[in-house]
Image: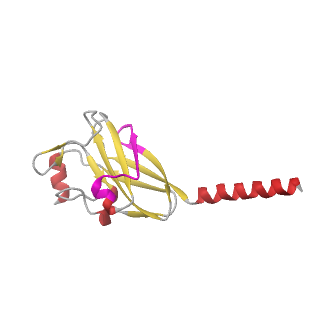
Amino acid sequence: MKTTKLILLFLLINTGIVSYGQNNATLTVVVDSIKTTKGDIFVAVFKTQDDFKADHAFQREKGVVSGNSSTINFKLPNNNTYTVAVFQDLNGNSKLDTRGAMKVPDEPIGFSNNKLARFGPPPFKETSFTLHNDTTIFIHIISSRKEFFKRVE
């Protein structure tokens, strides 16, 4: 009788662990087009439009530059919609620096689906994607103000 209960308990625990693991997927973010190895890469994952606008990330990670790219992995609940934003912190202050009245980024930035907007971040619906299983996305960062304005035209 004790053996049967132990086997049942083991099966219940094991089933819970397996089903938990099946509800997650790995999102691999490869940030490329990096022009300098100076500074770290900051990556933020957002689940909703409101969180994206308010800069309330679901998860944040910091990566290092290796050559002209950086790779960061996230373990996320699958079958959800996400948006990813990245920037390269060139001066080590752990924040995105901007310049001017229009707050144009002074440091390299990028978004999922490689979308940009002239004023502020691009719309959530243009940068979002649904994560169903393990996925790799590539984000090309824009490294200068001149390149930024050239890309959004």
Q: Nearer the viewer, residue 46 or 146?
A: 46
**Above or below, 12 relative to 90:** below
Residue 138, given in percent of the width and then of the height, sits at: 38, 53
What residue is drawn where x is 21% and y is 59%? 117
> Residue placed farthest to the left in the image?
101
Residue sitting at 16 percent across and 49 percent down? 104
Q: Residue at x 60, y 57 (%)?
A: 20
Q: Is residue 61 magenta-colored?
A: yes
At 52% from the left and 61% from the top, the residue drawn is 133
Quadrant for the N terminus in the image = bottom right
Residue situated in front as seen by the camera: 79 or 90: 79
Q: From what the image shows, is residue 48 above or below residue 71?
A: below
Closer to the camera in the image, 77 or 135: 77
Q: Quadrant of the C terminus?
A: bottom left
Q: Position of residue 145 (x, y in %)?
A: 16, 47
Which residue is most to the right?
1
Q: Does the rendering let one see residue 64?
A: yes
- Based on the picture, tell me whether residue 86 belongs to the magenta stretch: no
Observer able to see residue 114: no
Q: Residue 44, percent across and down?
A: 36, 49
| Residue 36 lies in quadrant | top left
- What's drawn in magenta, residue-wise? 51-71
Number of numbered markers:
0
Q: How is the image coloured?
A: secondary structure
Q: Position of residue 38 (x, y in %)?
A: 29, 33
